Amino acid sequence: MGIFSRFRDIVSSNLNAMLDKAEDPEKLLKQVIREMEDTLVELKASCAGCMAERAKVDRARAEAEQKVADWATKAELAISKGREDLAREALLEKRAYSERVEKLVAEAESHVGVVGQYQSDIAELEAKLDQARDKQRVLLQRHEHATNKKRAQTDIRKFNVKNTTAKFEQFETRIDRLEAEADLVNPKSKPSLEDEFARLAQDDEIEAELAGLKEKISAAKK
């Protein structure tokens, strides 16, 4: 496939439609971008070659124009010296170089058109390439987001409420057992004096309440 045919296929393609049909959009985008980059390199190389050829033609035209001027001068010199035969030959040379100048001018104009077309194609392909790179960047971001979301959901499932609660309960049970074992190893110390008086006051209240219940029951039997 020629460079222009490949270029036309690329710029006329519907990237969105291609991605919608693709089984692996990321892989397709990489392939398309790589092909665009390769085509762009070829277009720029061809454009540079055409510009170099145009410069070569311009130099040849300048040389031919100089020859036209030189032979015109020689024809005048021959006439001034009475050498009409030489003047005729000089004019023939002048005509030949004048015709060459016309051809080179036409060729230079043709190169101008080709270079302009190359530059237009390059700009169009660069815009298409930017579009593809933007889509690739979006796809990569979406892929990264989906991957992170999937990882997060997986982690959430690992630490669901039921399992987490059960683990906390197990941990709490272990602490309770450790505390009980600590109480057995280190019995509680003798109650303080304040604790003893508080207990005495509590005992008096209980005894008074108990006496009241006895009186109530005795009165009810009478």
Image (tube, rainbow, N blue to C red):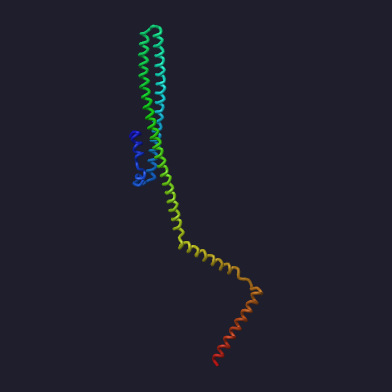
**Residue 144, x across and y down, in percent:** 44, 49
Picture quarter containing residue 65? top left
- Give the residue displayed 39% in from the left and 6% down from the top: 82
- Give the residue displayed 46% in from the left and 62% down from the top: 161
Decide: is 29 above or below 43.
below
**Frontmost residue, 135 versus 92:** 92
Image quarter in which the C terminus is found: bottom right
Q: Residue furthest bottom?
A: 222
**Residue 110, x across and y down, in percent:** 36, 27
**Residue 167, x across and y down, in percent:** 49, 62
Decide: is 15 above or below 96.
below
Picture quarter containing residue 196? bottom right
**Frontmost residue, 21 versus 74:** 74
Q: How many marks?
A: 0
Decide: is 153 above or below 54.
below
Q: Is residue 188 left or right of residue 89?
A: right
Image quarter in which the N terminus is found: top left
